[in-house]
Image: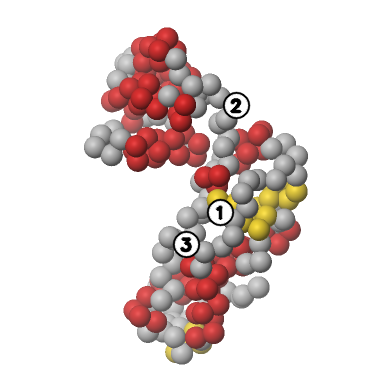
Amino acid sequence: MIQQLKGGDLFTQKLFDTLNNVINKQQSYLKQLPLEGNVFVDKTAKIPKRALKAKYPNLKQVSNPDLADFTIVGDIYNYNYNIDYGNGSYIGKPLPPDSAYGNQHWFVGRLNNAIDLYNSIVDKKLIDYRKINLNDDKQGLTPESAANITNLLASDDLEIFKMGYQLLMNHDYAKEKDLFFLCIARASSRNWYYRQRGIATEKIIKEIKKDYKNIKF
């Protein structure tokens, strides 16, 4: 466990190497999420905890990473904590003091973010959140269901739109991507702005944007 730092503390080469080796070095991930045990969901993992609980009822979600048997993580190795900002210019020197406004210096804050991440994943069994399919029990769209949902999404009435959006998100995007995208493409642009933005639904929207890169919505 590495303690949080403050302005004036020495930023050593050893500390830099310790953080850099764990955060940026490829880890051996679990192939699939175990059905039982204590699991910690790191803040880098974009996964809805309620859906996780519903799909894996025998897993105990813990808020303390030290109590976890394994940890669900996101893109931690692409996450920019800037611990080597300025080509390591702070290595071997005291960390910059707090600002005149009493706020923690921006570099110290980023360094402490890296320390938090290190403490939550070091010596832990990790699994990438993208390996966890919470939708495999959902059905893919059919032409008939897509047509019904499209009519709801195209409505100028916000409540009808919300009903269509909920119905759409109860289907598995990966099973019928073209139909899923067409439903959204024909949705009311005005009501689209007021859609309910949840972790699970926004994850699907992000996947659609990756698959249809030339479309803006």
Q: Label for residue 137?
A: 2
Distance between mark 1 and mark 2 Cα atoms: 23 Å
Look at the picture and state if 176 lies above or below 102.
above
Q: Residues within 10 Å of mark 1 (few under 14, many from 20)?
A: many
Q: Label for residue 73?
A: 1
Q: Disc 3 marks which residue?
A: 77
Look at the picture and state if 67 lies above or below 96.
above
Looking at the picture, which amino acid does disc 3 mark? Tyr
Q: Quadrant of the N terminus?
A: bottom right
SS label for mark 1: strand
Sequence-wise first label, 2 or 3: 3
User: Tags 2 and 3 in contact by the CB under 8 Å rule?
Assistant: no
State left or right for residue 155 relative to residue 1: left
Sequence-wise first label, 1 or 2: 1
User: Which residue appears at 47% of the width and 55% of the height?
Assistant: 75
Q: Quadrant of the C terminus?
A: top left
State left or right for residue 136 relative to residue 7: right
Where is residue 179, by image quadrant? top left
Look at the picture and state if 133 lies above or below 114.
above
User: Which residue appears at 44% of the width and 61% of the height?
Assistant: 79
In this rendering, the count of numbered labels is: 3
State left or right for residue 22 relative to residue 177: right
Marks 1, 2: nearer the viewer: 2
Where is residue 117, by image quadrant? bottom right
Q: Label for residue 100?
A: none
Q: Residues within 10 Å of mark 2 (few under 14, many from 20)?
A: few
Looking at the picture, which amino acid does disc 2 mark? Asp
